[in-house]
Amino acid sequence: MPTYIVRRLFQSLIVLLIILVITFTLPYFQPQGILAPAYTALGSRANPLNVHTWAMQHGLSGSYLGRLWSYISQLVFHFNLGRSFKQGQPVTQLIALYIPRTVWLAGVALAMTVVIAIPLGIYQASKRNSVTDYVATGTAFVLYAMPSFLLCILMIDAFGFHWPHLPISPPAGVAPWGIFTDPMGFILPVVCLTMLSVAALSRFMRGAVLEVLVQDYIRTARAKGCSSRRVLFHHAFRNALGPIVTILGLSIPGLFGGALIIEDVFNYAGLGIATVNAAIYFDIPTVLGITVLVAVFTLLGNLMADLALAVINPRIRIQGAQ
Amino acid sequence: MAVGVGHDKLVPMWRQRLRIFMGNKLALTSGVYLLLLLLACFLVPIFHPTNQTNQALTFNAPWNQPPSWHHWLGTDSQGFDEMGRIFFGGEYSLTLGVLAGFITIVVGTIYGMVSGFFGGITDTLMMRLLDAFLSIPYLFLLITLITVFGRSTTFLIVIIGLTGWWGNARIIRSDALLIRHLDYAVASKSMGSNGWHVIRRHVFPNSISNIVTVATFSVADAILFLSALGFLGLGIQTPQTDWGTMLQSGTEQVQNGYWWEVFPVAIIFILVVVAINYIGDALRDAFEVRLLER
């Protein structure tokens, strides 16, 4: 097992390197190439001389390989992600400012999702085709089928205007702990994000448990006289966890990036809004920095999902150790 | 839960499958709904044409009109007839969703099966590359690609299709990973079948239920992604439209009380995604070998 972990960690570092190269290269494909940010800052009809001066001041001149090497070495040896073109401050500072709010939003939503979706999925699978199953499946489908911005706006319309009981926006400003000045403003964004991810996850849980319930070992367990509760939680649940763990690991970038629409609608200053604003402005260092950060989170999530998969399933564990 | 236990004659497999599918009333209703909507989207504009592209003509037309005898669902904020626009936008949303979803499932299945089945260094390399793709914030990639390749319908299909298969590949790979350790796959290999044969004969048929489920979600996801792009202003360009763009402009009007610009298209949109998912569920049950008589 320890060798497996070390090997996976090493692989994760290589993946991180691939991501760095891909995201570093993407801006070169803009119609105006790597100089696009200069044109955004100076106007599309700017004097070529000014454009090149701007590019030089902001570290955009030089060969591709030279820039790539200096970016990676700065990141690895000095933990420096460069300066934002738009804000002028170090990207690491910007991220430190925005990240607590997004982690708070996505983390609470993720915890609530797991607590609601997994029991709901098991219950639906064990009572397949009952009225409860149909109602729960129908509700989950409708939520899943709704574009997230539509759900948010309808919720705002309902709880902000028709029955005005909740603030429609969390406290503004980007101070990391500013949200706690008015926790009520936090309810609508978290509830929306949770509703959306529960809808997606409980579907997979129901499917995974159903898949397991028709296996021979379940019939054997029933035949030898296990109570249906024991069959469900002891025999079925453990075998159904595999796909769910994979999905949970995969949902981490979705929660960070996917909270974007929620952040946009509720005007919640987090990483998502920062990314979109930076992308519109071609603020390459900021976009790159946030990409690297989300990538690290995702790799950690995948790593934990794979490890959990190995713990759950001995067949994979033994294969992994060899 | 065997179907038709006690029959003496063996019923052909496809008829058992058809019976399981037909037994699911929700799926049947969904199928009828989708069929009617498809016909409406592609036929109604032919038999009852409304102006949906000429902005010069709508300049003096009544904007934001409530439903009336002349405009059954009113007019939108640009003066277009709302009902005609729903069918018009539906052509784009449905075509794009099906084509892009199809690309994601074909690419995802092939990638996932090869990776999961062959294992070893192939699997490691393919999975790490996939990890890299999956870790790049999807929206940033989408925005960049759309900036580079433009927003024509073809490119939107290709871009959504070629960036949407990563999750599918991982799910299908975990299936293949399990099946290759099961006795029948091991036996087939020990008798000298090559890898491709085992994939075709054993791995693919035994994960078909998962592929079908994932495929339905993919089509629905593609339609949803297109709507998110519409919200961000990156969808189909005016005067052409899709349901996402319509919803986006409709939600701007909802606080003015212009309900007809949001709710009809929202209900049709949601029911489409729901219907596709119900059909996927029924298909999975129909493909489930273990539900058949044996």
Image: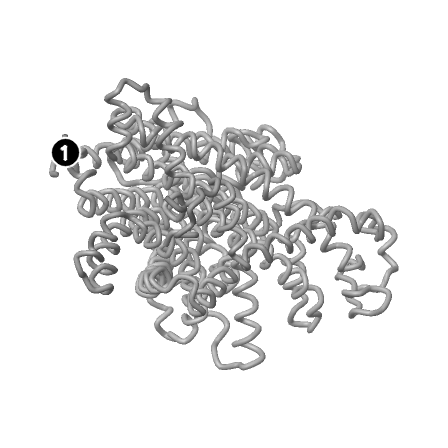
Residue nearest the viewer, comparing B16 with A101: B16
Furthest residue to the front?
B8
- Give the residue number, with chain letter if any, for mark 1: A321
Please tell me which residue is depicted at 51% across the width and 56% down the height of the picture: B24
* x and y percentages locating residue A285 in the rendered image: 42, 40
Host chain of mark 1: A
Residue nearest the viewer, comparing B47 with A307: B47
* x and y percentages locating residue A24 in the rendered image: 42, 32
Residue B46 in the figure: left or right of residue A45: right
Instruction: Count residues near mark 1 (Cα–Cα under 10 Å), then give few for <14, some for 14-19, many for 20+.
Output: few
Residue B119 in the figure: left or right of residue A53: left
Residue nearest the viewer, comparing A196 with A107: A196
* On-image quarter of the N terminus of chain B: bottom left
* x and y percentages locating residue B174 in the rendered image: 32, 39
Q: Specify the amino acid type for callout 1.
A: Ala
Please tell me which residue is depicted at 51% across the width and 48% down the height of the picture: B221
Quadrant of the rendered image containing residue B96: top right
Can you see residue A89?
A: yes
* x and y percentages locating residue A34 in the rendered image: 51, 30
Quadrant of the rendered image containing residue B70: bottom right
* On-image quarter of the C terminus of chain B: top left
Q: How is the image coloured?
A: one colour
